[in-house]
Amino acid sequence: MAVTEQQKRESRLRFHLFLFVVGYGVFAFIMLHVCSVYNTYEQFVIESIEQIEGFVDQVALQMQEAPIFVPTLRELQQFLFFSMFYFVMVAYYFTTRKKYMLGKEFGTAEWAKRGDIKKIMDRRKNNNIIFTQTEGMSLNTRKTGKNLNMLIIGSPGTGKTRYFAKPNILQANTSYVITDPKGEILRDTGCFLQKMGYRIKVLNVIDMEHSDGYNPFEYIRDETDVLKVIDCLIQNTTPDGSQAQDPFWEKAETALLQALAFFVWYELPKEEQNFSTILELLRMAEVREMDDEYESDLDLIFRQLKKEKPQHIALKQYSIFKQAAGKTAKSILISAGVRLASFNIPALGNLTSRDTLGLETLGDQKTALFVLMSDSNTTFNFLVAMMYTQLFDTLYHVADFKYRGRLPIHVRFILDEFANIGQIPEFDKLVGTMRSREVSVSVIIQNISQLEAVYEATWENIIGNCDSMLFLGGKDIATLEYVSKILGEESIDSYSISVSRESLWKHTSSKSFDGMARELMKPDELGRIPDRDCILHIRGMNPFYSRKYRLESHKNYKYLYDSSDRYFFDYRNIKGVKMAGRDLQFGDGDPYHHENSLLRERTLDHDFLRFPEIKFRLIKKVKRSDSE
């Protein structure tokens, strides 16, 4: 059990009280015999050492012959007189007692010793995550009592990929989800992962023709998931620093997109459930500023839906949008269209038309999911943020409802360039709850300001839920000050000399010694640590000043492209990783005009517009029946 300094002082106080009580018993026993011997031999006079020795011998002899006796009144009076001195001495001790913490007056920070890490490391090296050349931590969180979440801070060129990401992938002891902005991690480690039996999946928003398919609708289980997907889309397609003058606009736009998403998810067959279909529906919407009675094709569809299912949630959300009229409604439609504009690009529409990622299986079998995204163009990063949001939800659901709370295979997220991913809703809460489900994240950033910019209100919670922090180097002042503060202060001795001169030939000097506080490492010192060194801070332990991990020292290094050109991995040759939706055929003139689309025409010449469970008659026929 952990013990504070105050508890230690209280424990010492109780022990001292116990000693004084026991000491008083011994004192009483001896002094009563001394008084008895003294009264027996009143003529006894101490004039020499021999006489003192004789008196002591008499006291010792009486203790042996009559250890217990009844003292006389005079002996009791003499004993009480001497006891008074004893209690005065005890009272003086406790009243003058100080709260000394020698060597700890100003701080207790100190560097950890080499052997301190052994208590949280597994003897089997493959069962550890790698921090530095000499430090690591067991994957068994029940043994260590710590979560596996990490914060890695390092400016460009400090080796976040080489000294951290690659060594941990070479451990091959978990499933991995890896943000790979440059594609180099996949290129360098792909052959090794295939050799170790990993399934390799790729979400590539840079070269979409060579990507697994990712359809967000594939991972929607209930109405709450629909709301999360649309909220994530809104959150990550809103320009930084922009804020609508009237929140009604954004809320109405959100309601419209939610209505379309609910409609697609509930009423369309699986092959039509995607964002391209939502965009097609949005195109069917039209507002005429001078004609409030005008009904667009989309209005007619929802009117027919109201007849069939008047309590449909899509209708409820659509009615919120319809509260806006004329110019306001038109602006909302334009804003929603701009927000979905990316899906006008055929490659993105194809990528999201089907799903081959199989996110629900990452905790079942060893899988490496690589997320290739641009570190300079954030246009499609909203899709990455949406995928991460759904991946966390899916893993939580599988752990809770399929495996009774813990995934059989640990899933580890290595999130390089984390600040460029976009905002994952409620990420701070996820970081705080994933440990029990065998999920962990390694958040890799260049500086603290990056994290603060994306998660302005919750960035401290995210850091607080990472039990380990690895600082690889940097020069950002705010980051250096933050790391310095985390390392803490130590108590040091100060020595000063003062010299005063009365004349050219005469002077006096004085020396003084004192204690003072000093940061374990000042910010400017942190900015000057050598490139080969790093600092590791683990909750509940002293910080480690260590060497960065040498990639070449790993036993599996020989299987990397870094080691040999023969291990170059071309992800374009992975079976199944091809242009998502390439097998779909498109009509002429409209890249989103699917041959088999249930919304294939807007000329209103077809007999039926079909949906599961209900059939929507041709809008023209709806109008005709209304007129009749």
Image (spheres, rainbow, N blue to C red):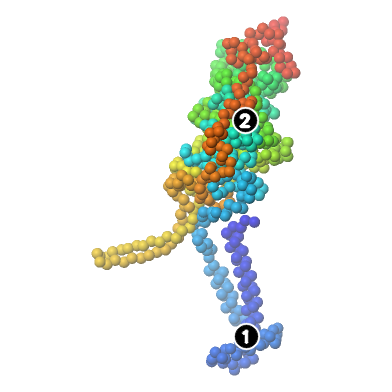
- Which residue does the numbered mark 1 point to in the structure image? 34
SS class, disc 2 = strand
Using residue 398 as the reference point, say whether residue 578 is left or right of it. Answer: left
Identify the mark at residue 623; answer none if there is no mark. Answer: none
Q: Residue furthest bottom?
A: 43
SS class, disc 1 = helix
Residue type, numbered disc 1:
Val
Residue found at x 53% / y 35%: 417
Residue found at x 61% / y 50%: 120
Residue found at x 58% / y 43%: 555
* Vertical arrangement, residue 430 with respect to residue 31, above or below: above
294 vs 159, nearest the viewer: 159
Give the x, y percent position of residue 415.
Answer: 56, 36
Q: Residue furthest left?
A: 504
Give the x, y percent position of residue 585.
Answer: 63, 15
Q: Residue furthest top?
A: 628
Query: Could you tell me if residue 22 is visible in this image?
Result: yes
Give the x, y percent position of residue 619.
Answer: 68, 10
- Which residue does the numbered mark 2 point to in the structure image? 201
Give the x, y percent position of residue 450.
Answer: 50, 37
Quadrant position of residue 463: top right
